[in-house]
Amino acid sequence: MSGDVAQLAHDLRARRVSAAELVREALAAARRRADLNAFVTLLDDAAADAASQCADAALAAGTASPLAGIPFAHKDIFCTNGMRTTCASRMLENFVPPYDATVVERLRGAGAVAIGKANMDEFAMGSSNENSYFGPVRNPWDAARVPGGSSGGSAAAVAAGIVPFATGTDTGGSIRQPAAFCGITGLKPTYGRVSRFGMIAYASSLDCGGVLARSAADCAQVLAAIAGHDARDATSVARPVDDYVAALGGDVAGLRIGVARQYFGGGVDGGVAAIVHAMLREFEKLGARLVDVDLPNAALAIPAYYVIAPAEASSNLARYDGVRYGHRCADPTTLEDLYTRSRAEGFGAEVKRRILVGTYALSAGYYDAYYLRAQRARRLIAEDFARAFAEVDLVAGPTAPTVAFKLGEKSGDPLAMYAADVNTVAVNLAGLPAISIPAGFSDGQPVGLQLVAPAFAEARLLNASHRVQLATDWHLRKPAR
Amino acid sequence: MSIDHTTTRRVARLARIAVDDAELPRLADELARVLELADELERAPLAGVAPMAHPLAQTLTWRDDAATEPDRAEALLALAPDSRGGLYLVPKVIG
Amino acid sequence: MSGRPAWQPVIGLEIHTQLSTASKLFSGAPTAYGAEPNTQASLVDVALPGTLPVPNRAALEKAIRFGLAIGASIAPHSVFARKNYFYPDLPKGYQISQYELPVVSDGRMTVRVEDGRTIEVAIQRAHLEEDAGKSLHDAFHAASGIDLNRAGVPLLEIVSAPVLHSAAEAVAYMRTVHTLVRWLGICDGNMQEGSFRCDANVSVRPLGETRLGTRTEIKNVNSFRFVEKAIEYEIERQIRALENGETIVQETRLYDAAHHRTRPMRGKEDADDYRYFPDPDLPPLVVTEADIAAVAAAMPELPEARRRRYIETLGLSESDAQQLCADKPTSDYFEAMLALLPGAAKPAANWVLGELAAALNEAALAIEHTRIPAPMLAGLVARVRDGTISGKNAKDVFAAMWAGEGDADAIIAARGLRQISDDGAIQAAVEAVLGEFPGQVADYAAHPEKQEKLLQFFVGQVMKKTRGQANPQQLLAVLRDRLRAALDA
């Protein structure tokens, strides 16, 4: 599938192709690229035909929305009615939800056709998609490398051209970092902009549903469909949704882009930094102005995140107990046996690690020293951004300190893995929107540029990204195969 | 810092995750190393800073009191590993 | 016995009241009691992955209403917190409750104890939380069955300070809370159905000691009588233990009604670490002055205020006022009658507390299901007051009304019970009777000491002649006049 959303929508309306054909083609591509292991579940042909029929009918009647008939993938963290939803975990290996997530409902309402559920790090905990019960996902640019995580399957499916877009979630960088590693565009909206109902929870005050696609323009189309208040999510914001598509073309002359030296710290690879600086010069060519900003508490982000996220996760994952759904151990003898064995068997190593860390951080005697302290640090980080945004319109930096690393390179060292999130987690702690756009290549691997905006300024992010994507072609590059 | 095995076992018990003795040293070590990360917060200028539990300054919005959810017992019980007579089953609980 | 130190029992009660909302605290599932298992458990209640809590406004309003009724502070900002522990009736593995910042705090209640004393009970806090489901341990052989219908029902947990010093005080307080929550319309108080549950924290200390002794918690006692007995037993048990040099173990105990004693809960592990933290799915609750004013405006007159009004303004006795204010439906019935019978508080009270209460009792009906609505009973009382019927006949009319024969006027007409109040008719009857009994008339004149008795005799005869329908007051007046005239003659 070579076209982007706008191109495909045009082709559908011009009758050059039908929704059924697009969907079948996407499914065939997914099967051809089974080597990527990007999918946990694929729709069968009959279900695919049924789904695309509705879209074709709407297209024929002239009542179709912009996304009608477009095939895409859902990260396997979104509950899909009647379709297995695993969160890449043995715990939910055979879980078939009897309900749809709000994001799923809205995209179906827009006529888009989900062809399957994308692989991910188990329960969204990971930065490489090596923590999946269903095996790792491979980077389409280099099969020996990770695609990033936790939305690794979504990123690989889009980068490989299987589908033009995929949904993802971002709790500490899980949309942006895989987008950077796979050379595509990934958008994390403001916290509360997209409903979390039906989006399996990892860390409730950090989780955000979003989109990975080949361009900011495509992201805008998808965000328009999924954003907005949902009465089923009490953290969902009632603020009206901006017209992201209409705002794409705005002029960026005079846009002030903040560059924080903390984002170009010691851990950032020289090649990556150079590519990012070069892309920032493209923004200057469009009339934007680069401004130095300071985020003095940036170093607190990783410690704070790796207390808060596990703490919330330890509570959110307590419901997986083998009683009402999900994995249950064989022949439990007592209630305690049922709980402890089902959970030990159902959860992978990283998930267990984070549950234990989180349990500890909340436990009596440690709550103040860990959880409360981390929440205070969180406020400092949020205030850093607030101060920066008094001077600039966007904050920029490399999405990740390196390009995609090799499979197995960091999986034995959790802390090394966590350190890779250094440029992304602060954004989640502050609840802000951010995007990663392809900025070039280093050592033959894609490099991502991250832009962060104030709360609810997604339109600004998409506009700036779109304008630079009109003037450059990094986002159009595709892997060899 | 180091976390001893007793603490690791206690935390695993609180989290209801079975750990066998062979795993304990590795888990204790991993736990300690992640918590060491958190120790960096000790040096931060946190005095007088209010904790932030929610990223945006939201306040709770409420739902009207109405019974809107239909009976879905059949569909939901079907998800359970063990159910009978309309009830979810667990090994007998004493007390 | 002279060496035995005096002990002071110290009791605090945690009362869980199920709020009478139509739907649950965090989901739109119904809350009605008695449904088939798991038919009132939604996706959210079963804690399916990705489901989220959405709070019920009516639960907050009821909590505020209670807070206002006990003169408590309503927190402008409060927080829902997660209480984390594992149990099969707790689907999420945590209960959404309130910990550091409850919505209601620092209230007080005036409690009348049986022995006539009045005590002030400080209520530390009242907070919102969700109820757990139910575990059924006897349904199956080697398994327990879980019903999640009750999971998520809103509770208001009312926590008293440890200021009660006897089982009698504790039960009196419990009854007062029970009356109030029903009065306010926030809880139906049905203990058999589990709408109103009480845990008692009991300890003892030497009289004069200010520090608290080790306490035990008695859970799951579902009647006033059992709470009283359980506390009495526990106090005695602790005193005996301490006097024997033993220490009290801090533990949870159950009341064993069959053996009239408390016993430790089997299988309860060492105290769980609940790891409370603010629920990230629920932003902070904000209650504005306007919110509070709205609830205050809709508040009913409270039982205490009404009781005092009945005594001070209407002149009713303490006992009558107390009985009328035992529950709101009775008091409302009385108010409805009063509206139609201004100035007739005493007769209205007598009828409500007398004939009506007896009839309701015999038919095992609550006043809400009375066969004689307030306006109808007011109509009967009006007919007695205006002399249409005698007080004696009124009881028969009541019975007929209860049996469904119609309203007072219809029955009076049908049975011809109208009193004869026409002066002429009474005069005629009196003349007739005096004419029939000249001997007694002479007697009346001759023997002043026999006059009262003879008067009664004449009254009786006139009543016979008028088939009981002569207006007694009028008859008496006419007779006295006539006989005095005879005397003077």
Image (cartoon, rainbow, N blue to C red):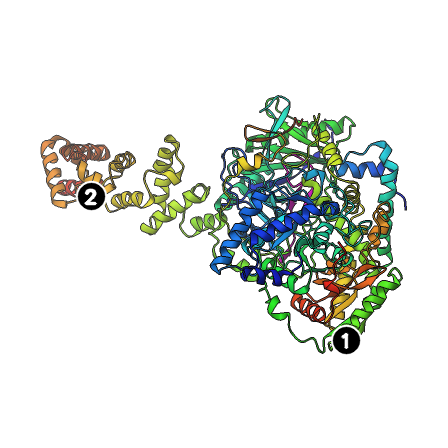
> Mark 1 sits on what residue?
A284
Residue C341 vertical position relative to residue C439 in the rendered view, above or below:
below
Give the residues in magenta: C76-97
Question: Is residue A50 shown above or below C4?
Answer: below
**At label 1, which amino acid type do we have?**
Glu
Q: A59 or C232, which is in the foreground?
A: A59
Q: Chain of mark 2?
A: C
Quarter of the image with the N terminus of chain C is: top right
Residue A41 figure quarter:
top right
**Mark toward the viewer: 2 or 1:** 1
Residue A126 in the image: state x and y as whole percent.
Answer: 77, 49
Q: Which residue is mark 2?
A: C474
Q: Is residue C351 magenta?
A: no
Residue at the spot x=59%, y=67% of the render?
Answer: A243
Neighbor class of circle 1 (other Cα within 10 Å; few <14, some 14-19, many 20+) is some
Would you say A107 lies left or right of C264 here? left
Q: Secondary structure at mark 1?
A: helix
Q: Amino acid at mark 2?
A: Gln
Nearer the observer, C352 or C449: C352
Residue C91 part of the magenta segment:
yes
Q: Residue at x 73, y 65 (%)?
A: A452
